[in-house]
Amino acid sequence: MSAVPADPDDEMTMAMSDPDPVELGERRRNLRRPSSATVRLRFGAEAIEGRAENVAPGGVLFFTEGEVRVEVELLEDGVSRTVTGHLVRSERIEGERRGWAVELD
């Protein structure tokens, strides 16, 4: 999966067509099906606030009660649909490759 900024308005475009699926821990409640859909993830303009757990020159870990609201556009087999949800996880898989998990409304 590659993530390339589409524009400076906090929009992320991701092509979900990697032939080598990543094996992640099984925490799923619903059945999944393979897909090669193109996904566009849009982040809202809202800010969230929280408390830092720790800070280092390379990053910060913080906790918040807020959610990162997103809009997800899926383009699959020529059909586009848009749904809303919130970001539940972003994880670096390998190198620059990153996995994103969104819980849909």
Image: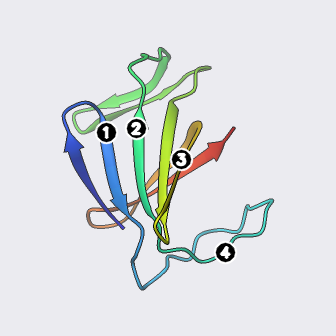
For the N terminus, give its image quadrant: bottom left
CA–CA distance between discs 4 and 2?
Answer: 23 Å
**The residue under label 3 is which amino acid type?**
Arg
Taking the view exactly as shown, the residue that stands out farthest to the bottom is: 19
Q: Counting other residues with Cα less than 10 Å from the Cα at mark 2, is it few (<14), some (14-19), or many (20 or more)? A: some
Query: Looking at the image, is 70 positioned above or below residue 62?
Result: below
Element class at badge 3: strand
* Pointer 4 or 1: first along the chain: 1
* Pointer 3 or 2: first along the chain: 2
- Residue 11's tag is 1
The answer to whether the residue labelled 4 contacts the one labelled 1, judged by CB atoms less than 8 Å apart, is no
Element class at badge 1: strand
The answer to whether the residue labelled 1 contacts the one labelled 2, judged by CB atoms less than 8 Å apart, is yes
Instruction: Give me the residue at 40% from left, 75% from top.
Output: 17
CA–CA distance between discs 4 and 1?
Answer: 26 Å
Which residue corresponds to mark 3? 89
Q: Nearer the viewer, residue 54 or 48?
A: 48
Pinpoint residue 80: horizontal percent, then vertical percent.
49, 55
CA–CA distance between discs 3 and 4?
Answer: 20 Å
Which residue corresponds to mark 2? 42
**The residue under label 2 is which amino acid type?**
Arg
Which residue corresponds to mark 4? 33
Element class at badge 2: strand
Q: Counting other residues with Cα less than 10 Å from the Cα at mark 1, is it few (<14), some (14-19), or many (20 or more)? A: some
